[in-house]
Image: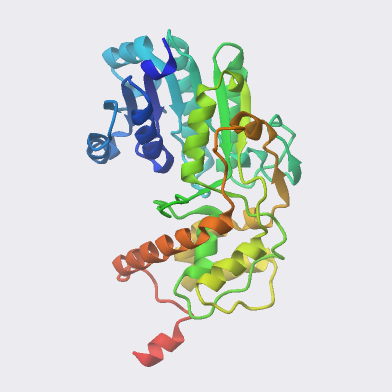
Amino acid sequence: MSPSEGATLVTGYPGFIGKRLVEQLAQQTRGRVYALVQPRFLDEARSLAARVQGAAVEVLAGDVTDLHLGLSGDEVERVAGNVTRIFHLAALNQLTVSREVAFRTNVDGTRNVLELARECRRLERLVHFSTCHVAGAREGVIAEDELDRGQEFRNAWEESKFHAEKAVVRAMDGLPITVVRPSTVVGDSRTGEIDRFEGPYALGILLVASPLVVPLPLPGNGVAPLNVVPVDFVVRATLHLAADPRAKGQAFHLVDPNPMSVARVYELIAERANRRLPKLTFPARAAEAVLRLPLLERVTRPQRAALGYINQLAWFTSSSTLELLEGTGIRCPRLSTYLDTLIAYVREDYARRQAAEAETLVEDPLDEGAKANA
């Protein structure tokens, strides 16, 4: 039986990547797609699944932190007997999450998925979604076949994803596993759509594209590469690697092979937003101190955690990925080719969110001109 005819299990539905992956899977497979959903997202997941075109999507209530993913005995038996592919996306990805919570979901949850995978009698591939940031604070050239280099970690999220991937690597002897490590995932390159604002991407929006009257200088010197990938590339590349026999037992960096510098991206965003940027930069530590000011702290807590990423001199190689994608037409587009699309979507969505939260957010301490004109 080919993979397209077997059932597929996807954890982490209806997350940012997960819901797009399920949509593509349903169009490519004749087998049922099982989507594991936390109970609190059940209504949303069922509504989305009902609109998916193609193969049937069956929503299963559960949680990767529970034994057998919280599934009933009946559900476990159906999954174990029918599933040929597993895509494990369920994870906590907040940069500020506590170590205990991060490890419970990202490490223990991954181990539970591996245990269920061992019960799947027809399993042909398990794809584990990791991240380039398992490299932690490492700098220099970082290869796809490198994982544990004694690196330090900037937060519990990085550390938990590192230990989760180590568990996956140990399981490769007995399971057909492929690991994908995306860099920072941004919106769709065709529509700009993105449904979460966090990490380095959100920091750029906060500093440049937000409605602050006075834009802040760039934190750091801006020479580090800003490696971002659009979600549509991540989904297409993952599905291809999942079907390629050569991808078993390997890890793949889903990255921009030629990322622009942070400074250049910052300049391009400013140009699109018709902003004149300050010519001076200031140290990243100073930026963090500014973002800790009482009037800014509430709205910038997630972005402070991202400062280390825009000053990290790290280059992620992707030779294995490029080799297996050769001839498929699947390539990470240059950020400059879809930046306008991202900005248009983000600015519209940002304005909607700000309007909705206007009554609860603190006043903009930099918007003195607006107050004077009120």
Which of 124 and 171 lies nearest the eye of the viewer? 124
Residue 214: x and y in percent read 53, 80
Residue 116: x and y in percent read 43, 16
Q: Residue at x 43, y 17 (%)?
A: 3
Q: Residue at x 31, y 69 (%)?
A: 355
Q: Is residue 135 left or right of residue 245?
A: right
Q: Residue at x 36, y 33 (%)?
A: 22
> Total marks drawn?
0
Residue 317 quadrant: top right
Residue 159 quadrant: top right
The C terminus sits in image quarter? bottom left
Residue 279: x and y in percent read 68, 78
Q: Is residue 369 above or below residue 198?
A: below
Which of 45 and 306 lies nearest the eye of the viewer? 45
Residue 329 quadrant: top right
Res 252 visible: yes
Question: Residue lying furthest right in this view?
Answer: 140
Res 103 visible: no
Residue 316: x and y in percent read 69, 42
Q: Is residue 36 left or right of residue 200?
A: left
Q: Residue at x 43, y 76 (%)?
A: 364
The N terminus sits in image quarter? top left
Which of 314 and 325 lies nearest the eye of the viewer? 325
